[in-house]
Image (spheres, rainbow, N blue to C red):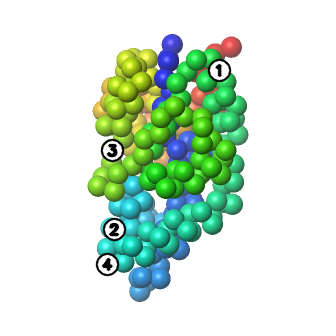
Amino acid sequence: MYKTLIYDFDGTIGDTLPICIAAFKKAVTPFLDRDISDEEIVSTFGPSEEGTIQALIPDHFDEGIHAYWQAYKELQYMAPKAFDGIRQLLDDTARAGFQNILVTGKARTSADISLEQYGLTKDFKMILTGSPKGPNKPENIVKALKETGTDASDALYVGDAPSDITSAHAANIKIAAALWGSIIEPEKVAALKPDYTCHSVAEFRKIVLPE
């Protein structure tokens, strides 16, 4: 049914969103005269991590982004492995002839840190990452389709966030909502009408590798 599977990272491949939030707190708090909430950090999401640092501590960008990369790497113990079933899914879909592609809003630096942590550095035919200027997933999905010669009807995106649903719709491909992470918004996701809703990697696997 599908030939190309396009994956989000945070909340889809691994439970890394809590790491991002904790790393941002560790990086920016020394430059602020107050504590910062999870909600304030999340409200800046859309651009890659550089964009969040720029939004939160624009006068200390260089020190802040360096501190973020360091904290993000140090905090990998919070989610040391990919979600159960992801490793086998990537192996089996590749063996079945699917093209596995990563399209994430993460910066390349943090994506590489987590891919290395999970032993997934060679599992994606293409890795397209975020921009500090703003959200770019729809454009990167279209770029992935073009560069792999995939028709939109032959591709499926899988991601956990409401923005993943709207990105897939904007790129005119089908979307599977990945609701297996620790930070999810099921009501918002449902309201956007994803093509599939999966509460486990095993449920997603049944869509792309039916027995």
Q: What residue is disc 4 on?
A: 59
In the rendered view, would you say 92 is above or below 103? above
Q: Which comes before the other along the chain, label 3 or label 1?
A: 1
Three-letter residue code for mark 1:
Arg
Name the residue tied to disc 3. Answer: 136
For residue 36, what is the image quadrant? bottom left
Question: Which mark sits nearer the N-terminus, 2 or 1?
Answer: 2
Which quadrant holds the C terminus? Answer: top right
Residue designated by label 1: 95
Mark 3 or 4 closer to N-term? Answer: 4
Query: Which label is found at residue 87?
Result: none
Of the numbered discs 2 and 3, the one sitting upstream in the chain is 2
Which-is-in-front pick, marks 2 and 1? 1
Q: Please tell me whether mark 2 sits on a helix, a strand or a loop.
A: helix
- Give the Cα distance between marks 2 and 1: 42 Å
Q: Which residue is found at the position 47% from the left and 79% from the top?
A: 29
Asked if residue 39 is positioned above or below residue 183 in the image, the reply reads below
Q: CA distance from mark 2 to mark 4?
A: 8 Å
Residue 47, image x, y percentages? 35, 54
Q: Which residue reaches farthest bottom? A: 33
Secondary structure, mark 1, is helix
Q: Amino acid at mark 2?
A: Gln
Distance CA(mark 1)–CA(mark 4): 49 Å
* Residue picked out by circle 2: 54
Mark 2 and mark 4 lie on one chain; the one further toward the N terminus is 2
User: Disc 3 on helix, strand or loop?
Assistant: loop
